[in-house]
């Protein structure tokens, strides 16, 4: 047995951080691949998209100061996209706050916050279910950073589950942009998700995004087989 005096506080903190980092990477960062693929041109990958924000460069500078730039924490599955080190707080219409919402990069031409259904319950609002970028009639709130705050008139949504597809994948599955498919998850908590929206773009890799509520419902980490169905 190791005595309590054999490790100083700094060493213990380093061990704890490393263990937490490894656990996070194993459970949340690694793509989930099916035991049996759909035999398409690209492997089927399902990832849980946790709550996050996209911001414009102008809003980034309001939140973090003039000249602020997003700094990369880790790469995401889609090429060129990354989780940044920057996080913000959001205050909803009823003055309830969710802290530490990570900003994803690079900056976009709109500012948007994507939350899960249970986040909406906490905020006391009915989150509109939308595809990213569709902000018509959506909720607003206040985004708070270390330098300033942004009064977001609209752009707080619950992201509709969707599948990013290269045109080759769309041809393989016989679908087109804006169609709907089904995602079948097999395992201890297996279930089938209806209405997985197809998003076709020649710059993307095949990837399905579900939110944290959906990932917890099917216990994605224990999935034994995943299949995308027309």
Image (spheres, grey):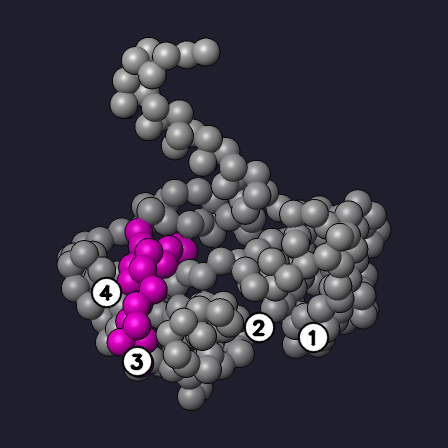
- Indicate the secondary structure of the residue bearing disc 3: loop
Give the left or right position of residue 159, taking residue 154 as reference.
Answer: right
Q: CA distance from mark 4 to mark 3?
A: 15 Å
Is the residue marked by circle 4 packed among few (<14), some (14-19), or many (20+) residues within 10 Å?
many
Q: Which residue is mark 2?
A: 160
Q: Is residue 164 visible?
A: no
Q: Residue at x 77, y 52 (%)?
A: 187
Q: Which residue is mark 3?
A: 94
Label pair 4/3, CB-CB below 8 angstroms:
no
Q: Is residue 205 visible?
A: yes
Q: Mark 2 or mark 3, which is nearer the start of the sequence?
A: 3
Q: CA distance from mark 2 to mark 1?
A: 9 Å
Q: Which residue is mark 1?
A: 195
Q: Nearer the viewer, mark 4 or mark 3?
A: 3
Q: Mark 1 or mark 4, which is nearer the start of the sequence?
A: 4
Q: Quadrant of the N terminus?
A: top left
> For the magenta stretch, what is the residue range?
86-105
- Indicate the secondary structure of the residue bearing disc 4: strand
């Amino acid at each position: 047995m190791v005595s309590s005096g054999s490790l100083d506080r700094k060493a213990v903190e380093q061990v704890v951080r490393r263990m937490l980092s490894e656990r996070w990477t194993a459970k949340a960062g690694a793509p989930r691949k099916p035991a049996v693929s759909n035999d398409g041109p690209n492997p089927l990958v399902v990832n849980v998209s946790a709550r996050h924000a996209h911001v414009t460069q102008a809003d980034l500078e309001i939140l973090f100061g003039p000249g602020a730039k997003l700094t990369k924490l880790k790469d995401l599955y889609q090429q060129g996209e990354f989780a940044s080190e920057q996080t913000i707080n959001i205050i909803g219409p009823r003055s309830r706050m969710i802290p530490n919402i990570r900003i994803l990069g690079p900056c976009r031409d709109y500012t948007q916050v994507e939350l899960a259904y249970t986040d909406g319950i906490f905020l006391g609002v009915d989150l509109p279910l939308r595809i990213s970028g569709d902000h018509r009639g959506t909720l607003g709130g206040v985004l708070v950073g270390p330098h300033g705050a942004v009064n977001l008139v609209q752009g707080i949504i619950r992201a509709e589950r969707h599948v990013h597809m290269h045109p080759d994948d769309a041809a393989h599955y016989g679908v087109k942009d804006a169609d709907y498919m089904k995602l079948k998850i097999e395992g201890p908590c297996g279930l089938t998700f209806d209405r997985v929206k197809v998003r076709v773009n020649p710059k993307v890799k095949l990837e399905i995004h579900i939110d944290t509520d959906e990932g917890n419902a099917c216990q994605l980490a224990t999935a034994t087989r995943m299949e995308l169905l027309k």
